[in-house]
Structure formats: C-alpha cells, structure tokens
C-alpha cells in the first residue's frame, strides 16, 4: 500500500497527490509515468509524474476528476493509502541523456496547457538543476484554471497566457509563441508541448512555420500502460508506435494528431456508462 502524504486542490476538479513511494522516486526521470490503482478492484490509471523527491521518497501526481477512477482517487485524503503505484514507466525525456556541454548550449521553450502543466514542471526543474533556464508558456482559459505557476516561476522564465486575458497575455499559447519569436526576438533549439491534444496539434503547426523542432507528450492516449492493450497506438512519421512503450514523447511534426484525437474518443461511450452507473450507486447508498 502507498500512503498519501499530501493532498491539495490546485483548481476546480484538479488535485495534487504526493505519494510515499521511495523506490519509484529513486528511479524517476522527467517524462516518465506511473500506473495507479486505487484498490484491488480498480482499473489501471496511467499518470505522468509531476515531481519526485529522492530524499523524502515521494512522487507527486496531478489528477483531473474526469472518470470514475480519477474521482475515486481524488476523494482520498492525506493518510489514506492506494493499492498500487507502479513505475517509473515509459522513456524519459531525451535531454536527460545529453552531454552536459551540449545541454547547456540549447535554448528550450516549453508550452503547457491545463493539466499538462504538471508534467512540464519536472522537465523544467531538471533542466534548471543542470544549468539550463528554459522559457515556459502556461496557457489556460482563465486565471482560476492556472496551476503550478509559482513553482514554475522559480525554475524558468515564465509567461502566462489566458484566453480571456484575466491573467498575463490575452490569447492562445500559439499567439504567445509568435509574440516571443517575432516581437521579442527569442530563438529556440527545441519546443516541448504538453497539454490537450488539440493544443499540441496547433502548437506543432505554429512551430513548423519557424522550423522549430517540437516534442509532444501523448500520455493522454494510454489505457493499460504496458503495450498489451493496443489502445494507445499512434502514427508517427507513417509508422505505428505505442505511446506507453515507445513514448510517451514523440516528434510533434511527425504525429498524426487527427488519428490520435479519434483514438482518444474511442471509449467515450464506456466512460459515460461507467459514470452513470457510479452516480446511480452513489445516490442509492447516499454517498
């Protein structure tokens, strides 16, 4: 069993859970994920690692309550335990294997949208600890939906974009990318985008205009997380790959995003039925 040592509400329906899992923390690297199971009857939920602390033996995950399993996770409190916390899984971000001198010469732009801000943080933090201070754009519909801004500002040059202009730059993250490059004269060697699939698609379309190499994380496609179910198949450069074992990060300019978005909606009917069944049972038992 794995104990929850901290729980925080970050924004509406978005929770941070810090889990005591020393073996996972010892081996974790930016870009990797864990598989969580709330109890012995629960489904496997792949979640990207949002932070890890080797000294304290903890791993942080950020969860948005969308389906039954994520709702079950988020009703737990500090001191409660979850049944399984397996990882780290998946391939770490490519830059962790770069020679130090090459790494320090590179200029990175990270674009984070919504809950995707959480997995961006350990990457930016790792770079900062290795002498690279990246630029980061965090995007959200409105100020109340922003997460990790304080943490990110400590390890990066932070820019915030909100659709309604309630905080920072008014407009989409793609407009802020153009603003940084065209108006502020910024130059980058690589862009890393993590967030909603549609956001990553348009980020890659924007960076392609500047011939800017772009990495995206397709963690949202994963179901089983081991490569056995095949649900996370994705076409990259005309080849069929599996997000969980070949990724979760890929060359964004090679990803077939339209196919990926269709695949992402494959289980919508089952998710709706599961939510309705769960809500009915909760109402019957007064929960």
Image: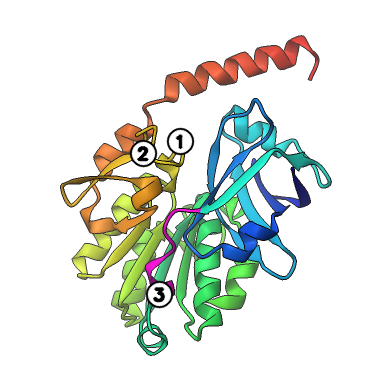
First-in-chain label (3 vs 1): 3
Along the line of sight, the residue nearer the viewer: 143 or 214: 214
Compared to residue 22, the image places residue 127 above or below, namely below
Q: CA distance from mark 2 to mark 1?
A: 7 Å
Q: CA distance from mark 2 to mark 3?
A: 25 Å
Instruction: Check if mark 2's residue and mark 1's residue have beta carbons within 8 Å.
Output: yes
Q: In the image, what residue occupies the spot 57% across and 33% down?
A: 66
First-in-chain label (2 vs 3): 3
Which span is picked out in magenta? Answer: 89-97
Q: In the image, what residue occupies the spot 15% across and 47% down?
A: 238
Along the line of sight, the residue nearer the viewer: 18 or 42: 42
> In the structure shown, which secondary structural element does the residue marked by tag 1 occupy?
loop
Q: Which residue is mark 1?
A: 223
Please state if 116 lies on the left or on the right of 18 as rendered: left
Instruction: Check if mark 3's residue and mark 1's residue have beta carbons within 8 Å.
Output: no
Q: Quadrant of residue 96?
A: bottom left
Query: Which disc is residue 158 wearing?
Result: none
Q: CA distance from mark 3 to mark 1?
A: 28 Å
* Residue 157 visible at all: no
Q: In the image, what residue occupies the spot 50% across and 68% down?
A: 123
Q: Which residue is mark 2?
A: 232
x, y percent for residue 234? 28, 42
Inspect the magenta stretch and tell me whether residue 140 lies in it. Answer: no
Q: Residue furthest left?
A: 238
Q: Which residue is mark 3?
A: 97
Q: In the image, what residue occupies the spot 50% across and 23% down?
A: 271
Compared to residue 84, the image places residue 54 above or below, namely below
């Amino acid at each position: 069993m794995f104990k929850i040592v901290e729980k925080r509400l970050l924004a509406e329906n978005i929770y941070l859970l810090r889990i005591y899992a020393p073996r996972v923390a010892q081996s974790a690297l930016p870009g990797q994920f864990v598989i969580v199971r709330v109890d012995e009857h629960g489904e496997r939920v792949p979640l990207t690692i949002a932070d890890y602390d080797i000294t304290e033996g903890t791993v942080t995950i950020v969860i948005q309550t969308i389906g039954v399993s994520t709702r079950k996770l988020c009703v737990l409190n500090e001191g409660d335990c979850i049944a399984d916390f397996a990882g780290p899984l998946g391939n770490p971000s490519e830059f962790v294997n770069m020679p130090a001198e090459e790494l320090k010469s590179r200029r990175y732009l990270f674009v984070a949208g919504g809950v995707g801000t959480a997995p961006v943080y350990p990457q930016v933090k790792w770079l900062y600890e290795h002498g690279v201070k990246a630029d980061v754009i965090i995007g959200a519909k409105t100020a109340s939906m922003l997460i990790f801004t304080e943490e990110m500002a400590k390890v990066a040059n932070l820019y915030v974009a909100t659709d309604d202009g309630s905080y920072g730059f008014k407009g989409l993250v793609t407009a802020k990318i153009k603003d940084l490059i065209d108006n502020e004269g910024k130059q980058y060697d690589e862009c890393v985008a993590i967030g909603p699939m549609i956001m990553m698609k348009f980020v890659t379309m924007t960076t392609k205009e500047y011939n800017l190499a772009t990495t995206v994380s397709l963690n949202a496609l994963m179901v089983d997380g081991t490569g056995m179910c095949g649900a996370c198949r994705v076409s990259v450069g005309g080849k069929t790959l599996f997000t969980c074992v070949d990724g979760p990060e890929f060359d964004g300019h090679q990803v077939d995003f339209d196919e990926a978005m269709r695949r992402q909606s494959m289980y919508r009917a089952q998710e709706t039925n599961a939510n309705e069944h769960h809500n009915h049972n909760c109402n019957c038992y007064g929960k």
